[in-house]
Each structure stands twice: as structure tokens, then as C-alpha cells.
Image (spheres, rainbow, N blue to C red):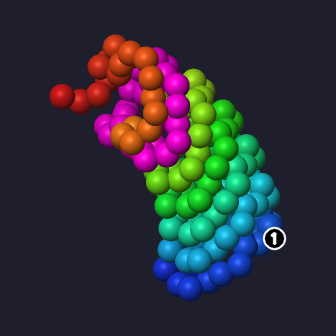
Amino acid sequence: MQLNLGANELNSSIPAELGNLASVKGLALYGNDLSGPIPPELGNLVNLIRLSLSGNNLTDAIPAELGNLATLETLYLHLNDLSGPLPPELGNLTNLRDLRVFRTGVSGAIPPEFGNLIELRELHLSNTALTGAIPPEFGRLVNLRYLSLWGNDHTGPIPPELATHLPE
């Protein structure tokens, strides 16, 4: 089952009850006027392959419970008013291929657990409030083809491990 309510004028918050849709494989709520936090109950959608919440007014931290979505391949959270750190639990999403959290207010360091995202092909973390070093664990991302970290406050050296697998 797919639930695509994207590109409408839906408002208010995301109902926690959507976390009861046990068989849903795709949930698209992008491009609306949804606000408030991402319900942690979405972490119950264990069959989910694609989650797109981009282009809303979602606030607060990304719930750690999203790290329970073991089958997830696409996670789009960009263009929201999210805050707080990136949860290290997202490093459990070993089937994830595309992660987009750009143009949000997420802050802090990129968790080294993101080096566990071995299927990741695209990682978009630009134009946020991320700080600290770029994790050398990114060298384990053997399928990574696009990495965007511009517009942040990263410090320290460029990890030589980045050159290990990125295509020429």
C-alpha cells in the first residue's frame, strides 16, 4: 500500500495514528503546510520503503524511532524547520539509499553511525546548522555517489577516507 498526499494544502500536524498503517510501503506528505513534530509512531511502519515529509513546516527533533524502519530506502526530511541533532539511530537504516535533510535547522555533529549506511548513494546534509568534523566513517559508504555538506559549520581536516569510494 502507498499513501501519497503530497503537494496539497494540508495543514495541522501529522496524525500519530498514521503509525498504525502496518502494511504501508510508501508515505508521501511532501509539499503541504504540515507543522509540529514528526510523530515517533511513524517508527512503527516497519514495512516502509519510502518516507517523504519534505517541504512542510515540521519542527522539533527527528525522532530516534525512525531508526526502526529497517526496510527504508528513501528518507526525505528536507525543507522543514527541524531542530536538534541527527539521531544516531538513523545509522541502523542499512537499506537506506537516499537521505535528504538539507535546509533544516538540525545541529550538532554528524553521528559516526552514519558510516553504517552501506547502501547509501546520496546524502544531502547541506545548509543546516551541523558542526564538528566530517566523520571518517564516511569512508565505509562504498555505494555513495553524491555527498553534499555545503553551508554548514564543519571544522577540522577533510577525511582522506572520503576518497576511498567516491567515483572520479
Q: Is residue 148 left or right of residue 80?
A: left
Q: Residues within 10 Å of mark 1 (few under 14, many from 20)?
A: few
Quadrant hosting residue 147: top left
Quadrant hosting residue 157: top left
The residue shown at (39%, 42%) is 151
Residue type, label 1: Glu
Span colored in magenta: 119-147
Q: Position of residue 3 (x, y in %)?
A: 60, 74
Q: Nearer the viewer, residue 73 or 80?
A: 80
- Asked if residue 47 is positioned above or below residue 141 in the image, the reply reads below
Q: Is residue 75 left or right of residue 34?
A: left
Q: Is residue 67 one of those drawn in magenta?
A: no
Q: Is residue 9 left or right of residue 43?
A: left
Residue farthest bottom in this picture: 9
Q: Quadrant of the C terminus?
A: top left
Q: Does residue 114 appear in this view?
A: no
Q: Does residue 54 appear in this view?
A: yes
Q: SS class of the residue under badge 1?
A: helix
Q: Nearer the viewer, residue 13 or 93?
A: 13
Residue marked by disc 1:
17
Q: Position of residue 148 (x, y in %)?
A: 36, 40
The residue shown at (72%, 73%) is 13
